[in-house]
Amino acid sequence: MKSKTYYIKTYGCQANTADSGTIAGILEAVGFEPLAIPKFKTEKEELQYVMKNTDLFIINSCSVRQKSEDKVYGIGKVVKEAEEIYNQKPFIVLAGCMVGSVTGERQRYEFSQLKRKTPWVDLYMNPLQVSELPLLLKREGILGDWAKNRIKNIVGGVKDTSTHAFVNISQGCDNFCSFCVVPYARGREVSRPKEDIFRDVRRLVKKGATEITLCGQNVNSWGLSVKEKFHLRAGSDHKLPFASLLREIHDIPEIKKISFVSSNPFDFTKDLIETLKLPKIDNYVHIAVQSGNNDVLQRMNRRHTVEDFTDLINQIKKVKKNIEIGTDLIVGFPGETREQFMDTVQLVKKVKFSVCYIAMYSPRKGTYAEKTFDDDVPQKEKKYRHDLLTKVWLATKRKQPL
Ligand code: SF4
């Protein structure tokens, strides 16, 4: 019997990429095969091919920017076309943060609103339901009784594509940065038990993985309670369970390289800085600063100041001189003046980041910033700041030694 095929379209961050890997592993464990797909020039062509050729289509969505959500809404058009032309469409599952945002205890808006905008979706699955996917599909009649025994044997399911693999070590976030949807979309911050993480890592190693990226919205706080973590400060002396976890994974002989995302400055303590010296730890670390101005950082509800951040970078560079640093920045946050923006420009000139993800602020429904502040920086000004900061960053990169 010909196997059924699946295709996953992933939007957003590495946590979503890791979840998509888990979903792929689960689907293959219950007998699906990945859809082999040629290279297409446009996303539309890719989606048209998927509509015609796959049985199951999973969209792992992102809510961080309106643009990401709009891309998902845009899929509706391709679905409609496929139904008109071929009189068929795959079974479509909408997964990820868009679903997390309308379900669970930190719901941002009504589920019915999402359903109204995506009538072509057959099943909704929030990020906490990933391991329940086989049962959800079975309930929908997509998996027959033949899959029963296989379902029983699923114990996680992280996808092994090549020598590199993502492993999620925590879910959710309790930081509530005022602009961010993640605490709503992915719920409370929950650290996965160490045994589960090691079980996944060992399984991946068995399948040939030599490089592991540990993922979470806030990996530094792995294993800490909210109360414990909010006592931490950038570069302070606190011991971190996450630093111990890195050391233990570092001891696995088959593993040659370890990376981790995402990190915030406030819980990046000396203990973690010290681990950067370990030979298998990647020479790149991503730490989101978001702004170079303390008033803006405060309104963003970030737990660090610009000085905390620059001191942290200095401490890191003392331990590992040539380490590459990446960051995330938002321009045009409510109330950000031209002068405050120029502080961000100065910070970028000073730190010389290897990677900068620069975003123009867009209000996200239900967040503190959306409810409290006016989105008062005109779009034209946001664009100007975005382009200027990008130019400044690229100029600092060119000056860096190769
Ligand atoms: S730390 Fe802040 S920006 Fe990052 S996921 Fe949590 S709330 Fe969002």
Image (cartoon, rainbow, N blue to C red):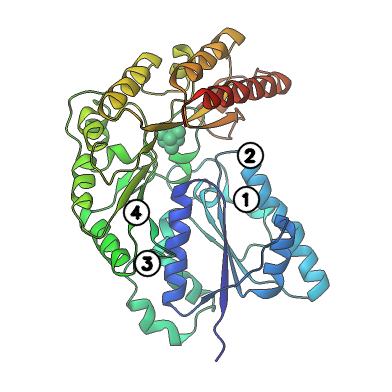
Q: Quadrant of ligand 1?
A: top left
Q: Residue furthest front?
A: 402
Q: Residue at x 20, y 36 (%)?
A: 240
Between the residue at mark 3 and the residue at mark 2, the CA separation in whole angstroms equals 30 Å
Residue 383 lies, with reference to residue 326, above or below; the image says: above
Q: In terms of sequence position, does the residue under pointer 2 or pointer 4 come before the other?
A: 2
Between the residue at mark 3 and the residue at mark 1, the CA separation in whole angstroms equals 29 Å
Mark identifier at residue 212 = 4
- Mark 3 secondary-structure assignment: loop
Residue 105 found in image quarter? top left
Mark identifier at residue 66 = 2
The residue where tag 1 is placed is 114
Q: Residue at x 56, y 71 (%)?
A: 6
Judge depth for marks 4 and 3 and give the one in front: 4
Mark identifier at residue 305 = none
* Tag 2 near tag 1, CB within 8 Å: no
Amino acid at pointer 2: Gln
Q: Position of residue 89 (x, y in %)?
A: 70, 71
Q: Position of residue 213 (x, y in %)?
A: 36, 50
Between the residue at mark 2 and the residue at mark 4, the CA separation in whole angstroms equals 31 Å
Q: In terms of sequence position, does the residue under pointer 1 or pointer 4 come before the other?
A: 1
Judge depth for marks 1 and 4 and give the one in front: 4
* Tag 3 near tag 2, CB within 8 Å: no
The residue where tag 3 is placed is 157
Residue 131 found in image quarter? bottom left
Q: Position of residue 193 (x, y in %)?
A: 23, 53
Q: Residue furthest right?
A: 85
Q: Looking at the image, can residue 234 be seen?
A: no
Between the residue at mark 1 and the residue at mark 4, the CA separation in whole angstroms equals 35 Å
Q: In terms of sequence position, does the residue under pointer 2 or pointer 1 come before the other?
A: 2
